[in-house]
Image (tube, grey):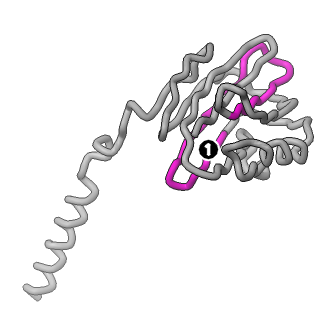
Amino acid sequence: MKFTLGLLTSLTSLVLLVTASPAWSQFDESAFRQALKVKRNVYLAEGAFSGGDRLISDVKISGVRIAANPAGYDRVVVDFSKSERPPFYLVENDPSNQRVTVTVYGKIKTDFSTQSTIQAARKTRTLSAVEFLPQVESDRWMFTLNSKFPMKTEVFELSSPARMIIDLKP
């Protein structure tokens, strides 16, 4: 009985020690940025950008365009209709998986050819594929930009018409 009680006490202490460690110690605030209003050449090797307007809920995405830029980076432009500003979004750069995940929040409707976007991605220096994920949640839509190697990202937005710009740099 003493052995069982001692083991239980040791396990409880271990669980408390593991769960009591501060989660915030893992949080690197410098890896999260607010999307810019203009291009500034501020690239993150890892982390996330957020931006847009949280009050915009009805969202129509009229295009996702991808092209190489002569300045040495590839550009992804997400076009929004019916809005002066983009809705709230999150762009996460995960270099260990060589992927950038884009999440757009709101009641999303898409009105563009995913096939032309996928074909355009194949012509870039950095991207190996684009995956448009099915809309599982009613309040968000996601797609991923899979890269040939780890990339740095810069995100900014433009208004009138509303656009989110993602620049990808080797």
Residue 144 in the image: state x and y as whole percent.
Answer: 69, 47
Across and down, in percent, residue 76 comes to: 73, 33
Viewer-proximal residue among 52 and 129: 129
- The residue lying furthest to the top in this view is 160
Which range is magenta?
Answer: 74-102
Q: Is residue 76 above or below residue 135?
A: above
Q: State the image quarter where residue 30 is shown.
A: top left
**Residue 76 in magenta stretch:** yes
Task: Using the image as rendered, state which of residue 100 and residue 89 is in the foreground.
Answer: 100
Q: What secondary structure is the magenta-colored segment mainly?
A: strand
What residue lies at 71% left-to-right and 27% top-to-bottom?
70
**In the shown orientation, is residue 29 left or right of residue 106?**
left
The percent position of residue 89, horizontal first and vertical second, equals 64, 31
Q: Which residue is mark 1?
A: 100
Q: Indicate left or right for 139 with 93 as reference.
A: right
> In the figure, 162 relative to 118: above or below?
above
- Return the residue nearer the eye: 116 or 142: 116
Give the residue displayed 85% in from the left and 22% down from the top: 81
Q: Relative to 62, is 72 on the left or the right?
A: left
Is residue 24 highlighted in magenta? no
In the rendered structure, the answer to whether residue 165 lies left or right of residue 20 reads right
